[in-house]
Amino acid sequence: MAEKKFLNNLPVQQISGKIINLRVLEKKDLEKTLMWLSDPSINMYLNSNFRDYDMERELKWFEFIQSSNSDVVFAIEEKESGIHIGNCSLDKIDWRRKICEMGIVIGDKNNWNKGYGTDTVKTITEFAFQKLGLQSVQLNVFKYNHRAIRVYRKCGFKLKSIKRKDHFHDGKYWDTLLMELESSL
């Protein structure tokens, strides 16, 4: 299993939640990840448009992530089966200010609405606060992504600000919500 080291060589290998495990994303995961990112019914919820990504661009991104001291990407595995069902990340970690951005995608649509997203968000934010010593995890979510907004609120995220009509989707401009969870430690 791959291991990533950053922040004083802190090893990151696998993190266990209640129904998911997070492990560092590996090169073997890229084909499945690229398939998810290319799916319009998944891509519509992502902060970047990955529809035109190909394996060459995905490999360049993967090499960047592997060498980054401020980004880590995990594969989300269903705990019982070990099946890779999505990815999540802590990005743009600002070690001085102790903040980062979080991203998540449950790419296997058969596993939507089963609690995997909630467990993933709780698990990765606990890791960010307890293991990395961060004080704030932030994220952006489009206003039409009601399912994700419910998950984030359930996990304690609060609305920090709104970027009005910031995102164009399906013939309409939508607001982007900036949400934040602060450490209680």
Image (cartoon, rainbow, N blue to C red):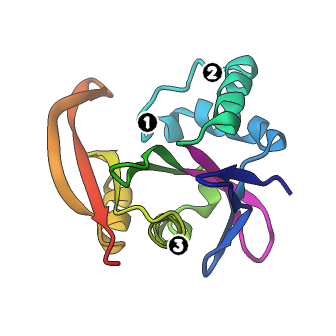
Q: Residues within 10 Å of mark 3 (few under 14, many from 20)?
A: some
Residue in the foreground of this view, choosing between 7 and 14 = 7
Is residue 147 on the magenta stretch? Answer: no
The residue wearing badge 1 is 44
Q: Amino acid at mark 2?
A: Tyr
Q: Nearer the viewer, residue 32 or 22?
A: 22
Which span of residues is magenta-colored?
A: 71-89
Q: Check disc 2: other Cα within 10 Å, few if <14, some if 14-19, many if 20+.
A: few
Choose the circle earlier in sequence order: 2 or 3: 2
Task: Quickly name the residue at label 2.
Answer: 53
Residue at 16% in and 30% down: 165
Residue 163 appears at what percent x and percent y?
17, 36
Q: Is residue 4 above or below residue 60?
A: below
User: The residue tagged with tag 1: helix, strand or loop?
Assistant: loop
Q: Residue at x 31, y 59 (%)?
A: 149
Relative vertical location of residue 121 with respect to residue 165 in this rendering, above or below: below
Residue picked out by circle 3: 119
